[in-house]
Amino acid sequence: MDLFEHQARELFEHYGVLVPRAVVADSAPEARAAAERLGGRVVVKAQVRTGGRGKAGGVRLAADPAAAYVTAGQILGMDIKGHTVHRVMVAEPVQVEREFYLGHALGRAAGRFLAIASAEGGMEIEDVAARRPEAVARIPVDPDQGVTDAKAAEIAAAGGLPAEAAPTVRRLWRVLTEQDALLVEVNPLVSTRDGAIVALDGKVTLDDNARFRRPYAHAADTADAGDPREAEAAARGLNYVKLDGHVGVIGNGAGLVMSTLDVVASRGPPADFLDIGGGASAEVMAGGLAVVLGDPDVRSVLVNVFGGITACDAVAEGIVRALDTVTLTKPLVVRLDGNSAARGRAILAERAHPLVHQVDTMDGAAARAAEPGPAVKGGALLPTPQ
Ligand SMILES: Nc1ncnc2c1ncn2[C@@H]1O[C@H](COP(=O)(O)OP(=O)(O)OP(=O)(O)O)[C@@H](O)[C@H]1O
Ligand SMILES: [Mg+2]
């Protein structure tokens, strides 16, 4: 999970890394009040979990609180690479002397930790690495030894960072290891005229596998005002992605869902991706169906399950359970194959819901689900009147 910049900033501060004073704001008046608190002149920054905010006009200087009000009003609601800006961070402007790049990452290809440092900060590090690979130092870090004072000095020197940056290099390594992060990146890390080293930006990716031992990540997740269906799916432990289109696709296993999306896409764009995972229970299936059907863009749903660890009868029971508690108003096309397919099909056949269609093959099911039907507005599943 990626943290927002303001969350990364807070973590950095906790570990003793110098960061600009900053306040988050959800509205233009809040941004103006924040600017007043911070001394008037501020930088207003879009808080979205994607890069390239500056280029998109999402990072701007405001000369005074009135300008912060106007600027925040322009940035809030902006779309940056498909991410809507719901929040800005209002930060104190720093007198930058030089900009550097520093990252600690788990290098999967190398199979070890890597510190990445460069004197060409502020721009996209991928571009610098492509243009002038010698300008980007990559220093392997032994996980048992970690970043010692000596190692931090070595990393700073290799990347052309001032020697004063070494303690920051070490503190950011602590963020990586103690917070179970896969990436801690500061671009730019800057030196100021009075010789301070300040992290002006922060990107932290936490390892979802370590979620259970990280209270911070939990707080970060609940603070996120993202797509409500994605949040609901995450709360149910489902892997869900909202796409553009009208067919909701549910399957067991990301590979099967991806190939189902391809088959549907050859007939019309898919709407949602939902992976119920291996060994899914009836409860998981019912929950997944509720999430996908709750998307007003979805006009039909395709459930494609190839039972392995997941038993098709459990999937069928989940569908029946969903049908019992809510009113289905859109076609539901189901293809069950593999483990307990015959029992699963029988359960659905017995329920005999007029909007549930069973198709034996993936191609046939995709064709059926992609058939243009009447667009149904509003929620697909309405509570059954008691
Ligand atoms: N508090 C600040 N004071 C002075 N300048 C700042 C401050 N914050 C950002 N800047 C300037 O704005 C530039 C862009 O900011 P930042 O790196 O946070 O956004 P970005 O890189 O465009 O976003 P992303 O990292 O998501 O691509 C920085 O390189 C820096 O020059
Ligand atoms: Mg940046």
Image (cartoon, rainbow, N blue to C red):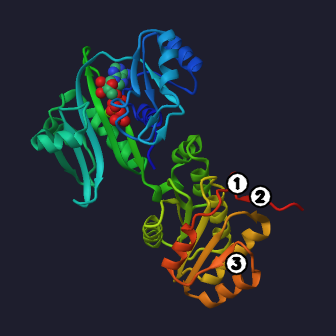
Q: Please tell me which of labels 2 and 3 falls first in the chain.
A: 3
- Ligand 2 sits in quadrant: top left
| 119 to 38, vertically: above or below | below
Percent x, y of residue 126: 22, 43
Which residue is more in the foreground, 281 or 148? Answer: 281
Amino acid bearing label 2? Leu
Amino acid bearing label 1? Gly
**Residue drawn at the location 75% of the way across and 80% of the way down:** 352
- Contact? badges 2 and 1 (CB < 8 Å): yes
Q: Please tell me which of labels 1 and 3 falls first in the chain.
A: 3
| Structural distance between the alpha carbons of marks 1 and 3 | 22 Å
Task: Find disc 3 in the rendering and name its residue.
Answer: 317
| 15 to 297, vertically: above or below | above
In the figure, residue 232 lies in which quadrant?
bottom right
State the residue lying farthest toward the right: 386
Percent x, y of residue 297: 60, 53
Residue 200: tell me if it is visible: no
Amino acid bearing label 3? Glu
Disc 2 is placed on an element classified as strand
Percent x, y of residue 183: 34, 47
Q: Which mark is residue 379?
A: 1
**Residue drawn at the location 70% of the way across and 72% of the way down:** 355
Task: Find disc 2 in the rendering and name its residue.
Answer: 382
Which residue is more in the foreground, 195 or 136? Answer: 136
